[in-house]
Amino acid sequence: MYSFTNDYSEGAHKNILAALIKTNFEQTSGYGTDHFCEEAVNIIKGLVGNEDSSVHFLAGGTGTNTAAISAFLRAHEGVIAPKSGHINVHESGAIEAVGHKIIQVEETNGKLTAGQVEEIAKAHYEDEEKEHTVKPKMVYISNPTEEGTIYYKDELIKLREVCDKYDMFLYVDGARLGSALTSVDNDLTLKDLGSLTDAFYIGGTKMGALFGEALVINNKDLNVDFRYHIKQNGGMLAKGRLIGVQFIELFKDNLYFEIGKHENKLANRLALGVGNLGYGFNSLSSTNQIFPILPNDILKVLSKKYSFALWEKLNDEQSVIRLCTSFATSEKMVDEFIKDLAKLTFAKEKLLKELEAQKANEQIVSEPEELEVKENESIQEVPVELKETLDEKDIEVAAKSEPKTEIQDETEVLPQEEKENNLDIAYEDEEVIPIQTQVIEETQSVILDEEITEPVNENISEVVQPKKAVVEEFIPMEEENPADSEKFERVADNEGDIFADVFKEEKNSEVFESVKNDVTFKKDDDLDIFSEFEFED
């Protein structure tokens, strides 16, 4: 079982572990007053570019949000947040538990707009009985959002203007901030966050650290007595130096941003692979979370080998899932997921066509006198003596041995150069862009040939069309051996072999035998065609 469920399934980046081991026996003072935390604070203040900013280290994201919001707001004040915001849906009511109402807003793609904020604030201050309601005092957003989308600089500027107009604080949850700041669409910097927000935090837990977040308070008035609130909310570690050591390492040689680039690169690779198979997406994500819409029966099978978050069940046929990449995600596992999804997609397509062909043959046998022969078409008459002896088994044999369709015949006469002109995922000169190339040359992607019965839709949706960007190579763990790359291409159909026309191993024909043998299918009455699918352990 491999997990794409979240970005904190693994431990920590190897550089961080090495730094913790190296400093393990050094004795320091506690509760974040040690020299490691002091060094990390100075590094972060330099990156933020605001010498008046204060930096505090806390254990986790929920504790950071709770300590900050409870400290910044008075008892009668509330916080405006997107309905999908983390403080609203994933923190067990922590904000309400400390006495502050979350004023929810229906958002688009997880993002809160300045217009929505102003509408709420204006309505409050125009109310003659406003003292009877909760006063909006803070605006909460996260970057990236819970939908994987990011805020642009002009959007943040407009939010800042509205907050200033109505005397509100602007707070940014940065649990995955490294992924947002290294998105190909991003135009924000840490310095922008330092000047446009009252407070924001730099996430470590979801960005390759063992744990820990760095809260940056830019509004000096909000920093008064804040350490009391950290302690009161359980966010102050006795061994605070452990967080300081990690953030020193995260910002050494830009490791924090390299991790973000790596996560985004592989999420983009996933999105291209899924999109090129013809599937859509629920949101326009350019970070390390993607939200494809996939068939429920295929998800049932994939869940036997991969874990992922079920985001939303759209109907009986389709659901939205979240696939998340981390500092430790490898290209090999991304390509393997795409390969398995491709196998299931085309296996399902083939089985459904077999069922349709079987039904058509049954209709021909049972009602031959009612069939109408269209112009320029002919149907071969079934001899009377044969009609009397046909049974279900004969029909099944006929279905399996029926001639190839016109689509299949047409593909056989296509020029060789057109057969090899397949959509695939590739990276040239370390750019994250979809291109047309020969099947799986150096990237381990698995996109199928145009000779399959119904070709993959080559009109890739805008959702999987990222901007061109130069992405530096970043290998988080062990370097993959290019010699181990699997190379597949389409081969001719063999009767009874459900995957014969999907993949072929060029280098060693035995390699794919295990892939073909690791699944079984049963055509149930309820059309649950994957009911007995099993991956090989």
Image (tube, helix red, strand yellow):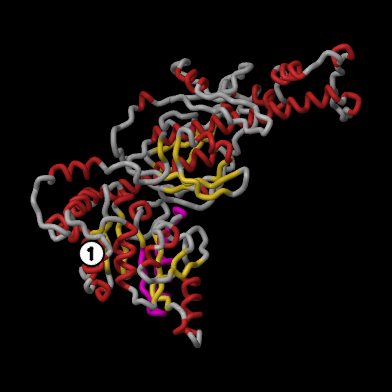
Q: Residue furthest front?
A: 97
Q: Residue furthest bottom?
A: 128
Residue 135 coordinates in the image, percent (x, y): 42, 78
Is residue 417 on the magenta stretch?
A: no
* Quadrant position of residue 478: top left
The residue under the point 46% across, 40% down is 270
Residue 45 coordinates in the image, percent (x, y): 22, 63
- Please tell me how crowded label 1 is: few (under 14), some (14-19), or many (20+) other residues with Cα within 10 Å: some
Q: Residue furthest left?
A: 27
Number of numbered discs visible in the structure rendering: 1
Please give the range of residues in magenta: 147-172
Is residue 155 on the magenta stretch?
A: yes
With 194 as the anchor, is 18 left or right in this view?
Answer: left
Q: Is residue 421 visible?
A: no
Q: Is residue 11 above or below residue 526?
A: below
Q: Residue furthest top?
A: 385
What amino acid is at disc 1?
Lys
Residue 369 coordinates in the image, percent (x, y): 91, 25
Q: Which residue is mark 1?
A: 231
Q: Is residue 388 above or below residue 60?
A: above
The residue under the point 29% across, 39% down is 476
